[in-house]
Amino acid sequence: MRRIAMPDEGIETLFGSLDDNLRALETALQVRLRTSGHNVVVAEGEPDDVSRAEHVFGQLGDLLRAGYRFSRDDVKLAAQLVSSDPEVALEDYFLRSAARTIGRKQVAPKTPMQRRYLEAIDRHDVVFGVGPAGTGKTYLAMAQAVAALLARRVSRIILARPAVEAGEKLGFLPGDLQEKVNPYLRPLYDALYDMLDADRVARLLERGVIEVAPLAFMRGRTLNEAFVILDEAQNTTSEQMKMFLTRLGYGSKAVVTGDVTQIDLPPGRVSGLVEALRVVASIEEIATVHFDERDVVRHPLVQQIVKAYERLEAPSRSA
């Protein structure tokens, strides 16, 4: 049994209501924990796990002394970080990678892979973000795009999606072509409006500083000094993906996001994203970040749903 001294200030938020935050840390550390006043007692566990628990709570105590105040989500993240990497330096996530203020929104990575994704976008001109829904692929790419625009590192943002019919026919939707495809682009608009006020978005769209368009509209263009996001890229064809990747001009960045388990192309058509991941694998200047269910930041049930579908689809993939 080991007793770990913790500072008085902020300890309530770390322990959580009825010590429920400690339960998450118990699972991650594989030990039994209890409290004694403001101290943490490691009541049971293998020697290596007990030593790791001491190391982790030492770091948490240092963060409290440095003035950091934990939310429930922070403690959940700390437990996830420890599960992924027992030697993780929590200070790097909670102090050094503090939230970035982008427009009217504070954006911070909530998982180790999200942090790697943001760093990859900072360092590389072309980044692929691949994984299930709810992992922040599109939202974080949009945050980086808005930050680059506001800092004048790029002169415009271009947001594109393939207008693939996911079980419904475009022809039955009312309006002209732009009005027909706008519902497919809605998630990009939603992320944009989350970071900038509506009037500013309207002005930027009107001036063409921000352009939201179907992927087909990219053909024949060269995109200079632009931050380009291709969303739902699993629904591109080989030809569309090649066309998109060769649009990139001077001073531009491209982020390609998609979920290879959600392909809506007709049977027999190869996904441009699946093919591109093989094609660019040997190009060191291009980064690929793979997310999984641990990176899902929606309702906790979504993680379980993603994992359940992966189990269902595993036999068919291995066949």
Image: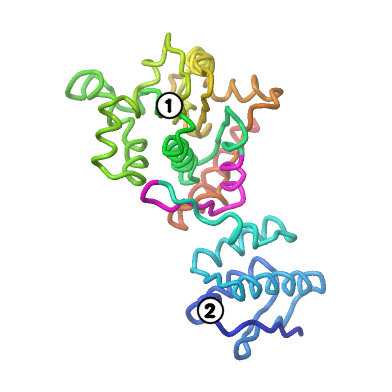
Q: Which of marks 2 and 1 is in front?
A: 2
- Is residue 257 depicted above or below 111 in this figure? above
Q: Which residue is at a point 40% across and 20% down the rendered structure image?
A: 215
Q: Find disc 2 in the rendering and name its residue.
A: 10
Q: Which residue lies furthest to the right in this view?
A: 47
Q: Which residue is at a point 35% across and 38% down the rendered structure image?
A: 187
Does the magenta-highlighted stretch encompass residue 110?
A: yes
Residue 286: x and y, percent? 64, 27
Q: What stretch is highlighted in magenta?
A: 103-119
- Is residue 249 depicted above or below 187 in this figure? above
Q: Find disc 1 in the rendering and name its residue.
A: 264
Residue 143: x and y, percent? 45, 42
- Real-space Cα distance between discs 2 and 1? 49 Å
Q: What residue type is labelled 1?
A: Asp
- Is residue 128 depicted above or below 241 in this figure? below
- Is residue 268 depicted above or below 274 in this figure? above
Q: Which residue is at a point 38% across and 15% down the rendered structure image?
A: 216
Q: Residue furthest front?
A: 152
Q: How many neighbours does mark 2 have within 10 angstroms: few (below 14), some (14-19), or many (20 or more)?
A: some
